[in-house]
Image (cartoon, grey):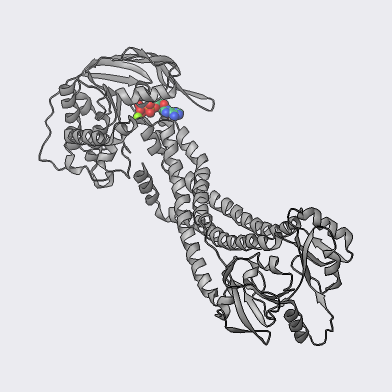
Amino acid sequence: MIVARGVTKVYRIGPTEIRAVDGLDLSIEAGEFLSIVGPSGSGKTTLLHLLGLLDAPTSGSVSVEGRETLGLSPRELTRLRREKIGFVFQEFNLLPVLNARENVELPLRYLKVPGPERHRRAMEALEMVGLSDRANNRPAQLSGGEQQRVAIARALVTNPTLVLADEPTGELDTQNTCRVIELMRNLNRETGQTFAIVTHDPMVAGYTRRVITLRDGKIASDSMGAEAELACDPEAPTI
Amino acid sequence: MLKYVLRNMWRRRARTLLTVFGIVVGIFALTVLGALSARLNQQVRGAETWFTSKISVVPSGSGLFGGSDRYLELSKVGEIEAVPGVKSAVAGFGLLLSDQSTGFGAPELIVGAELSKAQDLLNLIDLDRGRILREGDEGKVVLGSTLAEKFEADLGDTVELRGRDFEVVGVYAPTLSAPDGFAFVSYRDALDLFREVNPYFQVGDIAATIDVIPEEGVDAEELAARIGESVDGIKVISPAEAEKQISQFSLIFNAILLGIGFIALVVGGLSIINTMIMSVSERTREIGLKKAVGAETGSVLSEYLLESAMIGFFGGVIGVLAGLLAVYLLNNATSSSQVTVFSVTPTVAIGPVVFATFLGTAAGLFPALRAARLKPIEALRED
Ligand SMILES: Nc1ncnc2c1ncn2[C@@H]1O[C@H](COP(=O)(O)OP(=O)(O)O)[C@@H](O)[C@H]1O
Ligand SMILES: [Mg+2]
């Protein structure tokens, strides 16, 4: 599905060099449900951006579904990204002037999907995350957990083969974290979509099948996860 | 996209409204002055037919619109008529209808012409009703359209000009120019009135202007040059020269208009640039997000161009509406003096809106390019 070979990302701040990602090899198969963990500053976000073609490595290469991305123009990268990859960011995920449905429609708009179909698919995606009744609410009228679910709906609406989430539960309480992870895992099981979730929450990592640990931009360990069953409390209030 | 852009503008309504207001002020001024200039241009164009269909002869040192207290000897008429190619030379005499000037545009004049030869001249303007003056019409008057309205006079009525009664025998159709404010009488009557008004100014038979109509097929420019060579003590204004003098009039005004437009351009343009730069930097993360979910450079660019174009467009529409309202009120306020000061033409109403929209788009170009070129990750990292 996605293969990174010897990827390195170097940031230069004046005379100092920061090797945020350092000669890293990683292969993710289609249908995986994995987490990327590690201390703050270990390079998780940078790696996710490299895998998601948002950023170009200083050296090394990333290929998506067997297609080498090195040397593609920004425009070709944008195309590839919006067709294959969905993103969920930690915070500030939604455009405040758009309501939930319009936020979800956004990637389809850029894919030039006609209006009625866009509308229908956005409503389907909101249905999937259980928020079809909040379609006309703006982000400010939604709880943090609901906002993240809308962001997930937006990541899913294009039917991407790979969903990359950067600390999607970082700002959520236990119950909302549980719901968001449950949602992603059910989708992974039902649709076979690949999920890579960056987190520093051991509980979240515990729910995944594979856990990649980063330290100083390198893979410190790559192991099987506990893949514990989720037990979210359906009675708990959403915030 | 338009809906989205409008919502973004509404987010910072105070700032957006202030920026729009900056455009409104400039466009308002542009509209009012545009209407003023349109009116002046109409006058000038109307005056052109009157002044450029003939050769005007004035005392040397004088101009097309008078400007000297010198007069022509009546004997010059004969000398000019002797020049080959001249069909007729008509002595004319003009004096102000009243000593109080109306202050705007062409003054109201009593214009006297030698009726025995003035048919061609008096036919240069279309009649609305009645007839033109003919030989022996002493004590009769043909009024320009504005004067007819002012006196509320119709055919057969009597009007008082400089203390003397005249019978109205004709009314000219509006030309939107100087002759609308003329009262045409016989040369004799005009000269008599002049003598009555200036009792201590002893004059013989004089003319203020001599209008020359060329014979059929004779080039007016060449004829004008020939008259100038053959007759002494006169100044000949050929149709081309008259046109030049008249267009200088509107040139000055159009230059003022251009100046106002330029100020509106600089002030409005800078405030749009400023507002758009603020918008772009406030929304850096949003732009990053959009790019991350698949927005191409072009779509971000057009979004921000549309926003600044809308600021210009709204400013333009409101400015023009305010300007038109002002023009309407001012025209009403001055209507009693029979002088229309402003003219609303399609250019006056639509031009400033187009201008403002274009200005907005141009001013937005730099900030929009900045937004469009943002790299998604850098934009997302921004706090
Ligand atoms: N744009 C940048 N410029 C300079 N240094 C950066 C930049 N982005 C990240 N870094 C540095 O790279 C390292 C890895 O950052 P990041 O990938 O965000 O780590 P994590 O997500 O694991 O906290 C950190 O030391 C961070 O300070
Ligand atoms: Mg991070």
Tell me where residue A47 sits by quadrant: top left
Left or right, B61 with respect to A125, comes to right
Q: Residue at x 35, y 44 (%)?
A: B4
Q: Which of A129 and B78 is in front in this view?
A: B78
Query: Does residue B49 appear in the picture of this structure?
Result: yes
Q: Which of B41 and B357 is in front in this view?
A: B41
Name above or below for residue A38 compared with residue B51. above
Left or right, A237 with respect to B146, comes to left
Q: Nearer the viewer, residue B317 or B331?
A: B331
Left or right, B95 with respect to A203, comes to right
Query: Does residue B337 appear in the picture of this structure?
Result: no
Q: Residue at x 17, y 30 (%)?
A: A183
Q: Report the quarter where the C terminus of chain A lies.
A: top left
Q: Give the percent coordinates (x, y) of residue A191.
A: 18, 22
Q: Report the quarter where the N terminus of chain A lies.
A: top left
Tell me where residue B124 sits by quadrant: bottom right
Name above or below for residue B102 compared with residue A13. below
Tell me where residue A117 sits by quadrant: top left
Q: Give the percent coordinates (x, y) of residue A120.
A: 21, 35
Left or right, B80 with respect to A216, comes to right
So how many labels did they put on this image?
A: 0
Q: Give the percent coordinates (x, y) of residue B145.
A: 58, 72
Determine the quadrant in which ligand 2 lies. top left
Q: Give the percent coordinates (x, y) of residue A83.
A: 31, 24
Name above or below for residue B256 compared with residue A203. below
Q: Which residue is drawn at 53% across and 57% down?
A: B348
